[in-house]
Image (cartoon, rainbow, N blue to C red):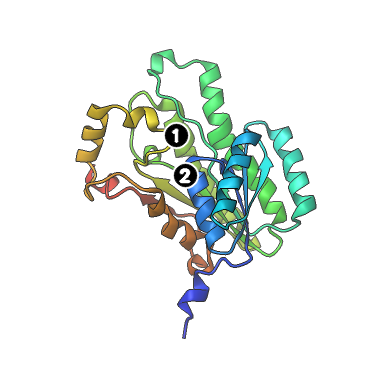
Amino acid sequence: MVNTASLFSLENKTVLITGGGRGLGKAMAFHLARCGARTWITGRNEDTLETTCHEAAAEGLVLQSLVMDVSNVPAMREAMARFEHISPTLDILINNAGNENLCPSDDVDEALWDRLLDTNLKGAFFAAQQAARLMKNGGSIINLASLTSAAGVARAVPYSASKSGILGLTRSLAVEWAPREIRVNALAPGYFHTDMTASFFDDAAWREKMLSGIPLGRFGLPDDLAGPLQFFCSSASAYITGQVLYVDGGTLCAL
């Protein structure tokens, strides 16, 4: 008989979350720490990481931090070398670091394109590459996709391109790394209120329009990602790789 509790257990698993100092990354870090995982958060801002670690400690949780900018590959490699010295093994990587910027396509310049793609897609690949080296006994990589991975959104071409690329990245790595028992999947959140999306949610007309297209009738809450995240992290999804799970209240199926 299958022990359901053990299937979803993350006790003593080592997890690294990029962009874990705020927003959905922070919420995911707190959830995984509550599940008993040794949880590391990374980001570019040391003060933000320290604040998040202190907030976790106030709840009796332990988070450890690593300053790392995934858009700067040489610097990221140096940071991962420091991490490897402290924690020579890694079980789970959550590629969460991301940038978003709405801009008419006619006004997109090379700097904006590079900033979004360097973090959202290039950074995700090289973070996965570095993490896979430490997954000596197999592991799980979860990439953060988006509704824009599957649906066109006006004024979001660089972001949409990066998140569509995440799907190709996820599927190709899943096939290539399966012999190493490294599973690669993607979570695609719908409309969640975070620091990065706050400017959208401040617009009452935007909120009304978006809410009308969500069959479940509400925006996503950080806790809505907890179950899908734990599923992909744990052995409950041991025979699943190369897949994307949309956590969107039914938005995509209603288009």
> Is 195 on the left-hand or right-hand side of 169?
left
Residue at 61 percent of width and 40 percent of height: 49
The secondary element bearing badge 1 is classed as loop
Which residue, as the protein is rendered here, is positioned at the far left? 212
Visible residue check, residue 69: no
> Is 12 on the left-hand or right-hand side of 201?
right
- Residue 196: x and y in percent read 44, 33
Which residue, as the protein is rendered here, is positioned at the far bottom? 1
- Label 1 Cα crowd, 10 Å radius (few <14 / some 14-19 / many 20+): few
Instruction: Tally the numbered discs.
Output: 2
The secondary element bearing badge 2 is classed as helix
- Residue 1: x and y in percent read 46, 86
Residue 135 in which image quadrant? bottom right
- Residue 222: x and y in percent read 41, 49
90 to 71, vertically: above or below: below
Report the front residue among 34 and 188. Answer: 34
Residue beneath label 2, please? 24
Residue at 76 percent of width and 56 percent of height: 88
Instruction: Name which residue type carries label 1.
Output: Asp
Which residue, as the protein is rendered here, is positioned at the far front? 58
Residue beneath label 1, please? 195
Instruction: Name which residue type carries label 2.
Output: Leu
- Residue 200: x and y in percent read 34, 29
